[in-house]
Each structure stands twice: as structure tokens, then as C-alpha cells.
Image (spheres, rainbow, N blue to C red):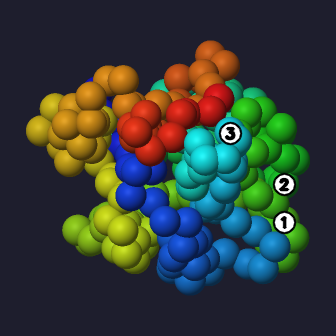
């Protein structure tokens, strides 16, 4: 079984939002919609012990995706490599998937009247290229690959970081596959 996903090294992320811009440009994401959003966590603490980090959020490529379960037309589906996708031809714009997503990472395109989300740039990966956000990250903090393959880049990055420094957004029964690396010397992970 394969599960294509993303790993983001928050120790390296500088919050520049190059990933947001690259995603919008590559995928033609309309004004007002965002498939990839960088949040600021913090600052927390009291001076001089202040902590802050940047948290890029995108589709969490859930292994048991709620968005897929609630879609009445089958427009939201999982591909063979585990990527959660939207077939825009089948989408009726009901937004059930948006309500079911616990991370709020789906957007409604008012122009086309369909739901959209991160696709892990399947169009680029199909021709052997990296996703736009990975290619354009000046800090080199993003990695895409099969998390179930121990020889993949993402699996190696996770192993090197150590289990205490690997985090995920809260699992509410959907089993998100995206992983974030944040060492305690940088900041404390916030749920």
C-alpha cells in the first residue's frame, strides 16, 4: 500500500510564503482561494523565553478521508498512490467535503462553482518533477513522497528527525498522513 504525502521541516521554515505563491501560480488558484496556507503559531511564552514557528497547512492526505466518505457524487476520491483528489467534472458544489474536513483546507471556487484543494501537483509529479511548493521553497523544508516506503525521501527525513520531533495535526479518526518536524530546541509543538 502506498501513501503519497508531504513532510514539512518546521525547524527550517522561515514563513516566507513562497509555497503559497508557487501553488497559486502553478495551479491557477483564483483570488480568495488558498490551497496552501502558512500560519504563524505564537509567539507564546514570556520574555526572554519566547517561542514561535510557522505552520504550512494543506490537505493532510488522510488515509481515512472524511471528505471522500461524504461526497455524494464520488468527486472526492483517493488515487492509487493515496493522494486525495477532486474530480471537478463530478463536483456539484454541495460543499459537504468542506464541512467534513477537520482542517479547513478545501476551498470553493466561486467562478467554477466547484471545490478545490491541494493536489500535490499531480500534473508535475506525472512528468517526474517536484511539486511547485517543494521546488520553490528557499529553505528546502518540504518533502513529498510515499510515507509507507522506507526508502523514500519523506521516510528518511522522518527517521532522521527522531520520533519525539515528528508531529501531525490532530487525528479525529481520519488518520492524516502529513508530518511536521519540529524539535523542542526550536519551539514546543502546539495542538
Is residue 170 found left or right of 123 in the rendered image? right
Of residue 69 and residue 36, the one placed in the foreground of this image is 36
Of marks 2 and 3, the one in the foreground: 3
Q: In this view, does 74 lie above or below 17?
A: above
Badge 1 density bin: few <14, some 14–19, many ≥20, Cα 10 Å: some
- Number of marks present in the image shown: 3
Q: In which quarter of the image is the N terminus?
A: top left
Residue 42 is marked as none
Instruction: Please give the name of the residue rendered at 37% of the width and 31% of the height, measured from the top-left corner.
Output: 165
- Name the residue nearer the viewer: 73 or 39: 39
Q: Name the residue under label 1.
A: 113
Q: Position of residue 45 (x, y in %)?
A: 68, 39
| Camera sees residue 131 | yes
Q: Residue 93 carries which label?
A: 2
The residue sitting at 87% across, 47% down in the picture is 94
Q: Is mark 3 on a helix, strand or loop?
A: strand
Which element is circle 1 on?
A: loop
Residue under label 3, please give it.
45
Front residue of 109/154: it is: 154
Q: Which of marks 3 and 1 is nearer the N terminus?
A: 3
How would you rate the neighbour count of disc 2 (Cα within 10 Å): few for under 14, some for 14-19, many for 20 or more? some
Gap between marks 2 and 1 measured at Cα: 6 Å
Determine crowd level at label 3: few under 14, some 14-19, many 20+ residues with C-alpha closer than 10 A.
few
Under circle 2, the secondary element is loop
Disc 2 versus disc 3: distance between alpha carbons? Answer: 43 Å
The quarter holding residue 20 reads bottom right
Amino acid at each position: 500500500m502506498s501513501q503519497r504525502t508531504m513532510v514539512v521541516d518546521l525547524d527550517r521554515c522561515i514563513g516566507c510564503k513562497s509555497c503559497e505563491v508557487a501553488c497559486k501560480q502553478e495551479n491557477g488558484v483564483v483570488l480568495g482561494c488558498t490551497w496552501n496556507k502558512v500560519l504563524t503559531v505564537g509567539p507564546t511564552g514570556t520574555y526572554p523565553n519566547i517561542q514561535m514557528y510557522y505552520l504550512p497547512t494543506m490537505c493532510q492526505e488522510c488515509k481515512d478521508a472524511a471528505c471522500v466518505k461524504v461526497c455524494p457524487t464520488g468527486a472526492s476520491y483517493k488515487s492509487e498512490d493515496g493522494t486525495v483528489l477532486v474530480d471537478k467534472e463530478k463536483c456539484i458544489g454541495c460543499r459537504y467535503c468542506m464541512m467534513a474536513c477537520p482542517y479547513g483546507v478545501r476551498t470553493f471556487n466561486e467562478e467554477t462553482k466547484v471545490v478545490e484543494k491541494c493536489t500535490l501537483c499531480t500534473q508535475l509529479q506525472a512528468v517526474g518533477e517536484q511539486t511547485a511548493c517543494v521546488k520553490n521553497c528557499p529553505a528546502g523544508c518540504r518533502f513529498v513522497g510515499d510515507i509507507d516506503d522506507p526508502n523514500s525521501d519523506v521516510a528518511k527525513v522522518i527517521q532522521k528527525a527522531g520520533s519525539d520531533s515528528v508531529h501531525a495535526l490532530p487525528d479525529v479518526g481520519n488518520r492524516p498522513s502529513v508530518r511536521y518536524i519540529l524539535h523542542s530546541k526550536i519551539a514546543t509543538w502546539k495542538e
